[in-house]
Image (cartoon, helix red, strand yellow):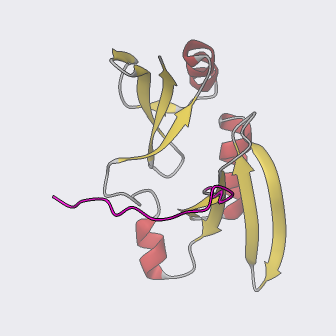
């Protein structure tokens, strides 16, 4: 077992995860799914040249972390689309009203791979995005 090393960090230090890259097959298809089906906000869509774009989407009300939609640019990246974590749940979409969001997602034809369940930590259900990445919709207790 590893012991955590203690670091002298100034109290003014503040870090956050600004974006998480999600490899997608196509920018426009991914934007359509996240903004229409999951009701995310398109934060930015900036052309970078040679077909590359800087595309950020974010869940409603989110203020910290965004998804950076990164179109696959090689066969290796294309092979990772939909399976960035080897079949495990990849992302956790936390909500303040599980049943509201679950019903809205069902109405938007989101694919759920199980029934909602109550766990010690909250109410949760696993769903898939348009490429098959697994997500948890989660309301913590």
On the image, the x and y values in percent for residue 3 come to 24, 59
On the image, the x and y values in percent for residue 21 come to 58, 63
| Residue 8 magenta | yes
Q: Residue at x 62, y 20 (%)?
A: 96
The image shows a total of numbered marks equal to 0
Q: Residue at x 80, y 79 (%)?
A: 48
| Residue 54 magenta | no
Q: Residue at x 75, y 79 (%)?
A: 51
Report which quarter residue 122 is drawn in. Answer: top left
On the image, the x and y values in percent for residue 135 come to 46, 40
Q: Is residue 22 left or right of residue 13?
A: left
Q: Is residue 90 left or right of residue 27?
A: left
On the image, the x and y values in percent for residue 37 come to 66, 36
Report which quarter residue 26 is drawn in. Answer: bottom right
Q: Quadrant of the N terminus?
A: bottom left
Instruction: State whether residue 27 is above or below residue 108.
Output: below
Q: State the extent of the magenta-drawn residues as a range.
A: 1-16
């Amino acid at each position: 077992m590893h012991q955590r090393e203690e670091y002298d960090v100034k109290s003014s230090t503040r870090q956050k995860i600004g974006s998480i890259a999600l490899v997608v097959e196509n920018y426009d298809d991914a934007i359509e799914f996240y903004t229409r089906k999951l009701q995310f906000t398109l934060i930015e869509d900036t052309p970078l040249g040679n077909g590359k774009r800087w595309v950020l989407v974010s869940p409603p009300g989110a203020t910290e972390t965004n998804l950076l939609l990164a179109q696959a640019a090689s066969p290796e990246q294309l092979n990772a689309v939909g399976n960035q974590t080897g079949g495990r749940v990849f992302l956790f979409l936390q909500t303040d009203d599980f049943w509201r969001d679950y019903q809205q997602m069902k109405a938007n034809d989101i694919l759920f791979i199980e029934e909602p369940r109550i766990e010690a930590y909250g109410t949760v259900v696993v769903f898939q995005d348009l490429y098959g990445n697994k997500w948890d919709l989660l309301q913590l207790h």
